[in-house]
Image (spheres, helix red, strand yellow):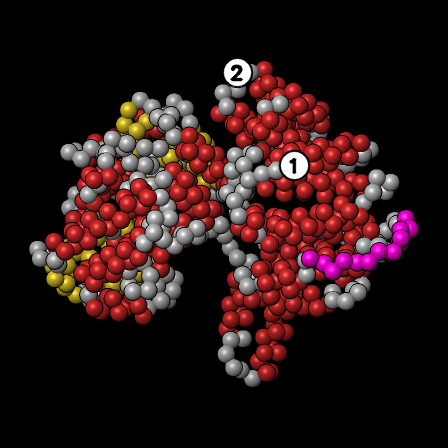
């Protein structure tokens, strides 16, 4: 029953509340009456607002506020819910919870109710729904079709540089979610006319800016734009006709003219809900916003985590809950998570992600848990392994172009030059080392597959067994299942450590591929899309074991290759150097990153023939170097030289094979962000920008050939 949406319905009568908890869609449900102590509830609500405001004044790590908020939440839980509802919330397995409220009760912070173990908003995927006496309006439903079109309005007034960074990071993150989002960022000239004319063209509308509250007439509250305020009454006038967005996220701070002492929860909620109700009234299915002002950095972190979860296929309510939990990671004493309110069905999904192993996991879960006869274990294992074998054969046919053929033998490997015997150092990376980090989140059926394959490849291992694992590394990496790819890569690393002297070429290839997978796992799973400005370091890399191991493997491969080695080994050195450059950039070490990229570019430029992947890496390195030189060192001459080299690689009038066109799209997306950053720096009128734009046009024309 965990996937069934439950409804917590609270109706206000004269001196009491009618409270009921039931499954959505049920035809009959029981309700209880709870005596309402209005003065007590009002004092508790005021205490909650006081704690949130105090957190803003004292900073994100204000001591003791979370404990105080728990006390307030526990008291509200006791005051507002019946004994039966409280018992059911503690006993039943509930995942999605809709709080259906009378409009007179929306001022109560229901999300912070605490059952003695956890806040409701941190325990459930919560969304609000409002009962109102105002006549309803039947709006045309909008269908969610991929890619979702998203409009980000950032810093409309021009006084919030942090909002621009938020928009940039969101764009960076969602550009990585292929075929899921089409993001448009608007920073300048954001007028009410622009919003009214363009809002219907998008599935998601995100505002990173200011709210303006009118406490005397809440209907005149709204968003501060370049030419005035987009008021709630302006939104209401848009009802009818083409549908409005599915989701509106107002990540807007409170007006600077308001002092914290005036933030009474009833007034704050009235101001918040005026614009929220206007959007909901006109047909918007989900509205997400804040009750109170929060720091810009916190707002940016919440929004980024929210959209990451949406892009990964999480329902809207689950994405909000994960974003709340993200704010708690630096310290559980923060209370900023409590300011976010979601109106709408928490179980709705905007992006559908099917799990290819879901059916197998259900089979394994049904057959394996508990104490059962040994014969049943054997039957379960045989069925699972049969299904996995069939799926592996399918993947091998579908993705064999990404893997090295299985027929590789020792005869095709160039004979390495004799080298003095060396002692193989005990590897830093081992299966047990990485398994401790990667194994628990891997699905049970995938664990069975990994165990089987790793056991087959243990010891010396035949070449075809290692190439089989290599195929799995490439296949799972192409499917973005980086945890599994990293698990298999550990076996390749063990083989490379044991055979580095005899088979240097294969060893360095294994090092490079394994390091790439570990680095992608770190970026994609942990801090993917916490993408800062180009030269700023990613936070959290010091704590990531996968990140440290990836750099260790890059370095290990580089130590094996000398300047006298054959050309094919030097090209692998270029790949290792490019990987090291990415690592330096993540750590914020810009000069070493530039040096590594330049060394890699020099090797690729001297090579007579490049593979498709090498051509992509060369183009990507050109863009990275131009970006680093402009944004970190302001060396426009160097940046210009690399852009011209990129233009020479893709003149725009030659036919590109399909593989080249697929990979160059990624370079074009990165180049678009580079141009966007130049415009934000006020360089749009310079000759440098014009030359960069010409190179971009060449890249775009290359896609149109053939």
Mark 1 lies on a secondary structure that is: helix
Give left or right: position of 414 versus 400: right
* Sequence order check, earlier mark of 1 and 2: 1
Exactly how many numbered labels are in the figure?
2
Residue at horizontal 76 percent and vertical 62 percent from the top: 465
Q: Nearer the viewer, mark 1 or mark 2?
A: 1
The front one of 78 and 142 is: 78
Instruction: Inspect this view and state whether residue 585 appears.
Output: yes
Mark 2 lies on a secondary structure that is: loop
The quarter of the displayed image where residue 149 is located: top left
**Which disc number belongs to residue 685?**
2
| Quarter the N terminus occupies | bottom left
The front one of 378 and 229 is: 229
Residue 45 lies in magenta, yes or no? no
* Dot 2 crowding, Cα within 10 Å, few <14, some 14–19, many 20+: few
Mark 1 touching mark 2, by CB under 8 A? Answer: no
Residue at horizontal 28 percent and vertical 60 percent from the top: 114
**Residue 374: x, y in percent?**
59, 83
Q: Which residue is tagged 1?
A: 593
Q: Main secondary structure of the magenta part?
A: loop
* Dot 1 crowding, Cα within 10 Å, few <14, some 14–19, many 20+: many
Give left or right: position of 612 versus 181: right
- Magenta residue span: 417-428
Residue at horizontal 37 percent and vertical 27 percent from the top: 159
**Which disc number belongs to residue 134?**
none
**Residue 216: x, y in percent?**
15, 33
Instruction: Inspect this view and state whether residue 337 appears.
Output: no
**Residue 690: x, y in percent?**
58, 18
């Amino acid at each position: 029953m965990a996937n069934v949406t439950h409804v917590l319905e609270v109706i206000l009568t004269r001196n009491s509340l009618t409270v009921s908890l039931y499954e959505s869609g049920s035809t009959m449900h029981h309700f209880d009456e709870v005596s309402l102590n209005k003065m007590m509830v009002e004092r508790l609500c005021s205490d909650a607002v006081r704690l949130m405001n105090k957190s803003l004044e004292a900073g994100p790590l204000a001591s003791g506020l979370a404990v105080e908020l728990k006390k307030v939440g526990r008291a509200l839980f006791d005051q507002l819910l019946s004994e039966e509802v409280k018992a059911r919330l503690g006993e039943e397995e509930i995942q999605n919870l809709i709080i259906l409220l009378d409009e007179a009760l929306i001022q109560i912070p229901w999300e912070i109710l605490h059952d003695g173990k956890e806040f409701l908003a941190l325990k459930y995927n919560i969304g609000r729904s409002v009962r109102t006496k105002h006549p309803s309006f039947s709006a045309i439903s909008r269908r969610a079709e991929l890619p979702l079109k998203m409009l980000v309005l950032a810093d409309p007034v021009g006084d919030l540089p942090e909002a621009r960074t938020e928009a940039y990071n969101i764009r960076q993150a969602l550009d990585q979610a292929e075929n899921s989002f089409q993001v448009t960022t608007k920073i300048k000239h954001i007028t009410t006319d622009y919003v009214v004319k363009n809002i219907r063209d998008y599935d998601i509308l995100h505002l990173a800016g200011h709210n303006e509250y009118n406490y005397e007439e809440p209907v005149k509250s709204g968003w501060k734009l370049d030419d005035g305020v987009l008021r709630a009454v302006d939104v209401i006038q848009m009802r009818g006709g083409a549908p409005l967005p599915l989701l509106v996220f107002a990540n807007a701070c409170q007006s600077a003219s308001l002092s914290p002492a005036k933030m009474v929860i009833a007034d704050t909620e009235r101001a918040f809900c005026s614009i929220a109700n206007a959007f909901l009234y006109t047909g918007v299915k989900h509205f997400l916003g804040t009750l109170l002002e929060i720091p810009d950095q916190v707002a940016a972190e919440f929004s980024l985590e929210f959209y990451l979860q949406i892009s990964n296929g999480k329902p809207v309510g689950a994405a909000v809950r994960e974003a709340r939990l993200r704010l708690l990671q630096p310290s559980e004493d923060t209370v900023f998570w409590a300011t976010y309110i979601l109106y709408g069905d928490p179980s709705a999904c905007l992006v559908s992600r099917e799990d290819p192993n879901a059916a197998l996991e259900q089979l394994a879960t049904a057959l394996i848990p508990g104490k059962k006869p040994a014969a049943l274990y054997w039957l379960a294992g045989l069925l699972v392994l049969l299904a996995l074998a069939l799926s592996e054969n399918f993947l091998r046919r579908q993705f064999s172009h990404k893997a090295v053929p299985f027929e590789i033998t020792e005869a095709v490997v160039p004979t390495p030059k004799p080298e003095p015997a060396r002692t193989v150092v005990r590897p830093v990376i081992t299966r047990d080392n990485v398994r401790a980090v990667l194994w628990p989140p891997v699905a049970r059926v995938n664990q069975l597959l990994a165990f089987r394959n790793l056991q087959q490849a243990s010891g010396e291992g035949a070449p075809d067994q290692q190439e089989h694992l290599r195929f799995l590394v490439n296949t799972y990496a192409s499917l973005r299942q980086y945890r599994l790819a990293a698990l298999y890569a550990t076996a390749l690393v063990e083989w490379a450590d044991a055979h580095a002297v005899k088979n240097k070429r294969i060893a360095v290839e294994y090092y490079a591929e394994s390091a790439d997978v570990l680095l992608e796992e770190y970026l994609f799973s942990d801090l993917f899309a916490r993408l800062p400005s180009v030269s700023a370091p990613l936070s959290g890399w010091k704590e990531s074991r996968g990140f440290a191991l990836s750099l260790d493997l890059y370095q290990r491969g580089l130590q094996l290759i000398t300047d006298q080695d054959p050309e094919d080994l030097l090209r692998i050195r270029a790949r290792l150097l490019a990987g090291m450059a990415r690592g330096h950039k993540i750590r914020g070490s810009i000069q070493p990153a530039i040096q590594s990229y330049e060394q890699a570019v020099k090797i690729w430029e001297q090579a007579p023939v490049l593979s498709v992947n090498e051509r992509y890496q060369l183009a990507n390195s050109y863009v990275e170097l131009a970006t680093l030189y402009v944004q970190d060192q302001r060396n426009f001459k160097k940046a210009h030289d690399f852009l011209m080299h990129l233009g020479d690689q893709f003149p725009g009038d030659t036919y590109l094979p399909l593989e080249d066109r697929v990979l160059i799209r990624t370079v074009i997306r990165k180049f678009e962000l580079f141009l966007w950053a130049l415009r934000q720096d006020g360089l749009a009128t310079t000759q440098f920008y014009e030359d960069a734009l010409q190179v971009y046009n060449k890249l775009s024309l290359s896609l149109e050939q053939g």
